[in-house]
Amino acid sequence: MGDLRVRKIEDDYDRTNMYHFALNDIEAFEILLKEKMFDSEVIHIGAEQELCLVDKCYEPSINALELLEQIKDPHYTNELALFNLEINSDPYPLTGKVFSNMESSLKSLIQLGRTVADKNDTEIIMAGILPTLKFRHLQFEYMTPIKRYQTLSESLLELRGQNFEIYLQGTDELIISLDSVLFEACNTSFQTHLQIDPEQFVDKYNWAQMISGPVLSTCVNSPYLFGNELWHETRIALFKQSLDTRSSTKFLRQKLPRVYFGTDWIKKSPADLWKNDIMRFPLILTSDDFVNSTEELRNGNIPELRAIRLHNGTTYTWNRLCFGHSNRQPHLRIECRYIPAGPTLIDEFANFAFWIGLMNNQNTYGNDFWKNTDFKIAKNNFIKAARTGFSTIFNWFGKNLSAKDLILNNLLEQSTEGLRHCNISEEDITKYLSIIEKRAEKEITGSEWLIKNHRALSKKYGDLSAQKTIVKESLQYQKLNIPLHEWSDLVSDIYVIKTEEERVEEYMSKDIFSVNKNDSLDIVRKILSWNNIHHLPVENDNGDLVGMITDGIIKRIDSYNDKKITFASQVMIVNPITIKSDDHLSTAKSKMEDHNISGLPVVFNKKLVGIITDKDCYYE
């Protein structure tokens, strides 16, 4: 959730003051490293589980704060949006049956949340991106009313100077904009933490970067956003663009997005990561109660390094340096942020164990492999894995290997040995790594399962019914904690009953034709006749809906044989009757009956998003 005691940087004095404390923190951090004051004897691991909330119709539910009040457990906390929650696990020593113990503990915490949620007609589900999430769920009222989130959103938007824009190309294409950072709330992850000996940090961090692509390829679980089939792990591109403050109108030189993989291997010290952040990214948040960290050290205290950590919390690397301390001894961690939530708890812990095993065994390639390896290979592998998941071909130390080949013939054995180095029980090693093995043998990932089943169901019943069915069935598998490779394909012969309470968005046509108000009637006639449709929306140059033309209007114009009428704007119905996508079918049906029309344009903020006809509104 981050530091809550924050405010915007108001003026040059604020900015100078924030720089002073952040630089002082880095100086204190380097003293801690030089004096070897970090804990490195007992290595711990931890995790953060992000969750989605849905109502009984499997659509986002915005009662996170009410649920938190009733759950009353300190492991639970809020997230950016009111349809998300997060569970922070306790740290566990990396030994024995640690993964089974952590899974059991997290399972109990999720069950606690589900018991409370059920009393509030809510379900808790793990999903990289919730399939039933819609753009309308990203309006400002869906943001958790906490000052940090609102301040961060306002500051980033001000820095960017215009709306945040998403442009993603996959099987489908999505272009959309928003005036807040709530695009980021679409992403839910399973963030894993590994404590690192500072003496080994440079090599370990570089290795974390190198294995990111292969690890991601086996756990992708987020192929859809707003019903569009995009990347196999759409979260990677979405997160980057959702917080991107760069603008082509402001800068001609290359600048980094605030969400990024990295620019090179780190070569000297963990402090290089924080130095890079403060050199490359403008400060946007500050606070009124920083302390002098070097002075704290001189007084025998361990400083919180709060200023630099606050700034670091406004930049986002997929492998992040984390600093913490307990019992008066600080420690360092690497946080792996790219693993998505789901498909089930046992799948997540399989991903966790696979990553931990690899992190603890890089000897095959040498600890300083990075000195002879181009950083762009690791970065390119990561981006390819996000795009294509288990279909990725990796450049792996000079060889082109498929994800299946690399994992089955190389990385699984390497991870197994890494877990044994940590004295993980053979029972845990077999339990979790066998899941990775089965996924690889079957070439199945969460994204592959979602894509296959969504395509089959949407052809017969439409996108919305497909999405709800997928959420419903995924939730049942999650409650039984059945690993993904044992899931069956969904039965396509489901019986969908349309009721008056169903929403317009479930049955409207989204692949629609429209014309500009200045287009000629010749093209209007052809579009109507070629496609055998009866309604044609008219938009202005800003993309706002301004009118509607029907085939009846065209027939009357043609019967008059009036040669002076040549443009759409001359015959269109001005300010047509419209409806919203989240209105009920009964509302659409009533509007059409009251106004004696057979179709309605569906709009959001004056923009056309679909058309619904009287035939779409038939229900039992």
Image: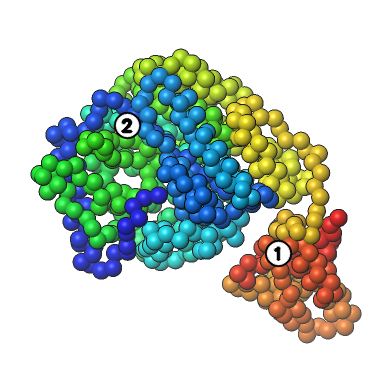
Q: Nearer the viewer, residue 113 or 181?
A: 113
Q: Residues within 10 Å of mark 2 (few under 14, many from 20)?
A: many
Residue 458 vertical placement versus 248 (above, below): above
Dot 1 falls on a residue whose secondary structure is loop
Q: Which residue is mark 2?
A: 195
Q: Position of residue 112 (x, y in %)?
A: 53, 40
Q: Nearer the viewer, residue 121 or 6?
A: 121
Q: What type is the residue that disc 2 sits on?
A: Gln
Q: Which residue is mark 1?
A: 583
Q: Position of residue 353 (x, y in %)?
A: 45, 26
Residue 273 vertical placement versus 409 (above, below): below
Q: What type is the residue that disc 1 sits on?
A: Asp
Residue displayed at 28% across by 35% down: 332
Q: Position of residue 148 (x, y in %)?
A: 38, 58
Whether residue 245 sits left or right of residue 394 in the image: it is left
- For the C terminus, the quadrant is bottom right
Instruction: Evaluate whether residue 508 shows in this view.
Output: no
Whether residue 487 sits left or right of residue 431 in the image: it is right
Residue displayed at 37% across by 29% down: 92
Q: Nearer the viewer, residue 27 or 558?
A: 27
Residue 569: mark in rendering: none
Query: Earlier along the polypeptide chain: callout 2 or callout 1?
Result: 2
Whether residue 182 sits left or right of residue 173 in the image: it is left
Q: Position of residue 556 (x, y in %)?
A: 87, 79
Residue displayed at 71% across by 32% down: 489
